Image (tube, rainbow, N blue to C red):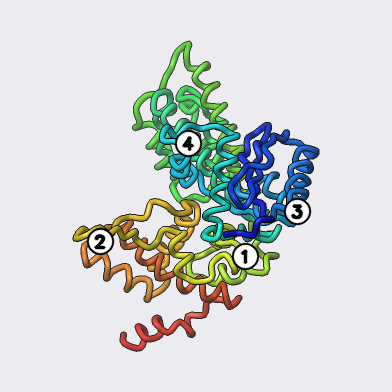
Amino acid sequence: MEHGTTRFGSVDWASEGHAACIVDAEGTAIDEFEVAHTEAGLSELCRRFRDAGVSRVAIERPDGPVVDAVIAANLEVVVVSSRAVKGLRTRYGLAGNKDDRSDAFMLADCLRTDGHRWPSLQPDSSQTLALRAAVRARKDLVGTRVATANQLRAHLQLVFPAAVGLFAEIDTAISLDFLERFPTAAKAAWLSEKRLVAWLAANAYCGRTSAAELLRRLHTAPAGLHGTSAPAQAAVTLTLVRVLACLVAEIASLEAQIREQLALHPDGFIFQSLPRSGCVRAATLLAEIGDCRARFPSAESLAALAGTVPSTRRSGKHLAVTFRWACDKKLRNAIIDFAQDTPRANPWAAAIYRRHRARGHTHPHASRVLARAWVYVIWRCWQDRTAYDPAKHRALQSLNAAA
């Protein structure tokens, strides 16, 4: 049992205000209050925690102004996942009702009883936080770009089918320039081979496909929309084209920023040394793993959080090894995206992947197995602050010697 003077705090955060609670070592709520989501409100929150002798504060999220304010006040932050909170509610009522003040009490009381099992939040450096924000923003923009490109493609299938398969991708610069200049089938009908050659040269086309072939694609595709409704449909085309062009430009700008941040980060060279890591992929791995070594004292802890190890459930004679759903999804996606591309450049990775595919594993399953193997390599390099060196990778060298 904790010392009688020990106090435990909690915050049930919201967008405009936060419910807070302080309990003593016996689980009695000695202070329950609400503060506004303002600088003055967060200052009052931290002041009341300090005045009550609170040293650890439970909250459901690992970042944001509330967490920053609590850490700045030299208080430990304990992150309790929303899934755990949902399960903990049944301790205090079978109905499982949701209420901000009762949730704040529940968090503080559970921190009192189970806090020894919950590690305190280990914050990353400001460089890593900035890199994480840029990487995640880029990923969101890429998702928006894909959705907008699909919307433009579906629209063109109805009004200008020839433009859909004219160039390799609908969101390349040459494709967007073409649609900006020729948004309808009627305008594209003006093109002859000579005019198309001149336009391609003026727009710095790479010349991968000849003008004659491009013109053939325009002429053999289904007829586009003509008539009085064509100008209105062209306006929609131009709107989608401009939105897509803006997204492509902003993504390129973010990638340039990510390259700069990665080059300046003390751990950047570690992740860039990995095979097929590139720039964005290396930055994503660094951003999701972080730079706080204390958060992952073992490779197994990193593998578990990344969801690359299965979940084992045993009851009596029943034994089930299943996919691990509870994990950090962003971290898992980053590691698996890296791992599944490494067989192209690393014989050791290729051997592991082929072996598990030969056993009948699906591609996602074999990729997770390979990701788990890479986690141990990445963790060792990360902990030792050293770049990945194939010459020191004993499993790889043994494979090369046996070949």
Lower sequence index among marks 1 and 4: 4
Mark 1 sits on what residue? 291
Q: Mark 1: few, some, or many residues within 10 Å (few <14, many ≥20)?
A: many
Q: Which mark is residue 147?
A: 4
Which element carries disc 2, helix, strand or loop? loop
Lower sequence index among marks 2 and 1: 1
Q: Could one spot residue 285 in this view of the protein?
A: yes
Residue 18, picture quadrant: top right
Which element carries disc 3, helix, strand or loop? helix
Q: Quadrant of the C terminus?
A: bottom left
Q: Which mark is residue 72?
A: 3
Q: In this view, does 169 lie above or below 185?
A: below
Front residue of this view, candidates 85 and 224:
85
Mark 2 sits on what residue? 361
Q: Nearer the viewer, mark 2 or mark 3?
A: 3
Lower sequence index among marks 2 and 4: 4
> What amino acid is found at the position of numbered circle 3 in the picture?
Ala
Q: Nearer the viewer, mark 4 or mark 3?
A: 3
> What amino acid is found at the position of numbered circle 2 in the picture?
His
